[in-house]
Image (cartoon, grey):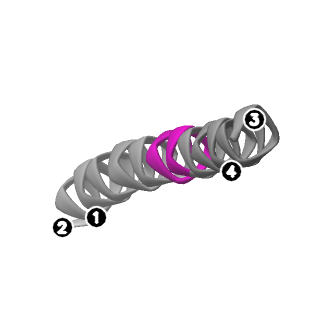
Amino acid sequence: MTEPDKQTEGKEAKPSRLDEARRVIEEYAANLREIIRKLRQKMN
């Protein structure tokens, strides 16, 4: 019965890493959008 628990832990660890990667990428994209917005304001 301990083997399914280990498999479940492994499956839970992968999505959390994926979620962390998505969070970092979304934060990076948001920062880029903010930079683009500021540059557009300066150009006008």
Q: Nearer the viewer, mark 3 or mark 4?
A: 3
Main secondary structure type of the part rendered in magenta:
helix
Q: Residue furthest front?
A: 44
In three-dimensional space, the C-alpha distance between marks 4 and 2, rounded to whole angstroms, equals 51 Å
User: How many C-alpha atoms fall within 10 Å of the one at disc 1: few (<14), some, or many (≥20)?
Assistant: few
Q: Which residue is mark 1?
A: 5
Q: Nearer the viewer, mark 3 or mark 1?
A: 3
Amino acid type of the residue that numbered disc 1 sits on in the rendered structure: Asp
Q: Which residue is mark 2?
A: 1
Q: Which residue is mark 3?
A: 39
Answer above or below: position of 12 versus 17: below
Amino acid type of the residue that numbered disc 3 sits on in the rendered structure: Leu
SS state under label 3? helix
Residue 9: x and y in percent read 37, 58
- Quarter of the image for residue 35 reads top right
User: How many C-alpha atoms fall within 10 Å of the one at disc 4: few (<14), some, or many (≥20)?
Assistant: few
In three-dimensional space, the C-alpha distance between marks 3 and 2, rounded to whole angstroms, equals 58 Å
- Quarter of the image for residue 2 reads bottom left
Dot 3 or dot 1, earlier in sequence = 1
Q: What segment carries the magenta color?
A: 21-26
Residue at the spot x=18%, y=67% of the render? 1
Q: Nearer the viewer, mark 2 or mark 1?
A: 1
Dot 4 or dot 1, earlier in sequence = 1
Q: Nearer the viewer, mark 3 or mark 2?
A: 3
Q: Which residue is mark 4?
A: 34
In three-dimensional space, the C-alpha distance between marks 2 and 1, rounded to whole angstroms, equals 7 Å
Q: In the visual, does 26 lie left or right of 14?
A: right
Considering depth in this image, is 23 or 29 the residue closer to the camera?
29
SS state under label 4? helix
